[in-house]
Image: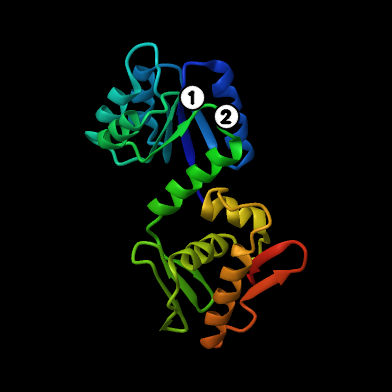
């Protein structure tokens, strides 16, 4: 599996180093540019999987960077900004940004936003035994029969099938799928997992979904 590369365009070296550490710990390769111009050059030459873009750069505005990138690239762009106004958010999205984070932000929220963008851009089908998931068509089949899932059930299954056998905690699932917005003590994850398990059983997919008591959930690899 190819390691995904993230380009951080940020002139504040302290912030850039923190981002590099958090993203590297999460398994990403990280490149850094300290200006808009250097960022555009690296984006063209290195073809990153995703770009984290500071809005207040020393040479020109991050919004201009978004516009220039969008002329020839569909790379996901998450803007990091301290400008917390509706007009500014609308402007950024209108220019072509995919998402934005208001500074200061928690590292877990950043990682959740990054994973959402990367998951949405994944187009190849994922297969585990008789189970196949097509992210582009949002279609799941088991032994050739369609598995009809709700949007959240599909997203949970897409998360689990990417690393069969790995146990995801309820907190990890909530962070990834709901971007950490579930209230503490919520049983929403358990409800969705129960529904997903029932739908798998309806197609004779017994035992595909594994519950590790007190830990979380996994697909049997």
- Counting other residues with Cα less than 10 Å from the Cα at mark 1, is it few (<14), some (14-19), or many (20 or more)? many
Q: Residue at x 35, y 23 (%)?
A: 62
Whether residue 114 sits left or right of residue 27 in the image: it is left
View extreme (top): residue: 58
Task: Say which quarter of the image contains residue 209.
Answer: bottom right
Q: In what element is the residue under mark 1? A: strand
Disc assigned to residue 20:
2
Q: Which residue is mark 1?
A: 32
As displayed, is residue 132 above or below residue 118?
Answer: below
User: Counting residues from the N terminus, which is met first, the one under dot 1 or under dot 2?
Assistant: 2
Residue found 47% across the figure and 67% down from its top: 154
Q: Nearer the viewer, residue 45 or 127?
A: 127
Seen in the picture, residue 77 relative to 34 is either above or below; the reply is below
**Closer-to-camera residue (171/53):** 171
Residue 172 visible, this angle: yes
Q: Mark 2 Cα within 10 Å, few/some/many (few <14, many 20+)?
A: many
Residue 111 at x, y = what percent?
55, 41
Percent coordinates x, y for residue 161 in the rendering: 54, 65
Residue 61 appears in which quarter of the rendering? top left
At x 45% / y 53%, what residue is drawn? 119
């Amino acid at each position: 599996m190819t390691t995904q590369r993230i380009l951080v365009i940020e002139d504040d070296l302290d912030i850039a180093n923190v981002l590099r550490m958090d993203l590297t710990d999460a398994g990403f390769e990280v490149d850094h540019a300290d200006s808009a111009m250097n960022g555009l050059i690296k984006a063209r030459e290195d073809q990153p999987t995703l770009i984290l873009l500071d809005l207040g750069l020393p040479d020109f505005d991050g919004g201009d960077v978004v516009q220039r990138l969008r002329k020839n690239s569909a790379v996901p762009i998450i803007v990091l900004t301290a400008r917390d106004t509706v007009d500014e958010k609308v402007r950024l999205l209108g220019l072509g940004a995919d998402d934005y984070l208001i500074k200061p932000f928690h590292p877990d929220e950043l990682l959740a936003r990054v994973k959402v963008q990367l998951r949405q851009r994944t187009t190849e089908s994922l297969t585990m035994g008789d189970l196949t998931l097509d992210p582009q068509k949002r279609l799941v089949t088991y032994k050739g029969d369609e598995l009809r899932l709700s949007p959240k059930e599909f997203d949970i299954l897409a998360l689990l099938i990417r690393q069969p056998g790995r146990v995801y905690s309820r907190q990890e699932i909530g962070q990834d799928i709901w971007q950490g917005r579930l209230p503490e003590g919520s049983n929403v994850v358990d409800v969705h997992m129960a529904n997903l398990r029932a739908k798998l059983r309806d197609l004779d997919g017994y035992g595909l979904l594994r519950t590790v008591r007190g830990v979380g959930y996994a697909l049997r690899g």
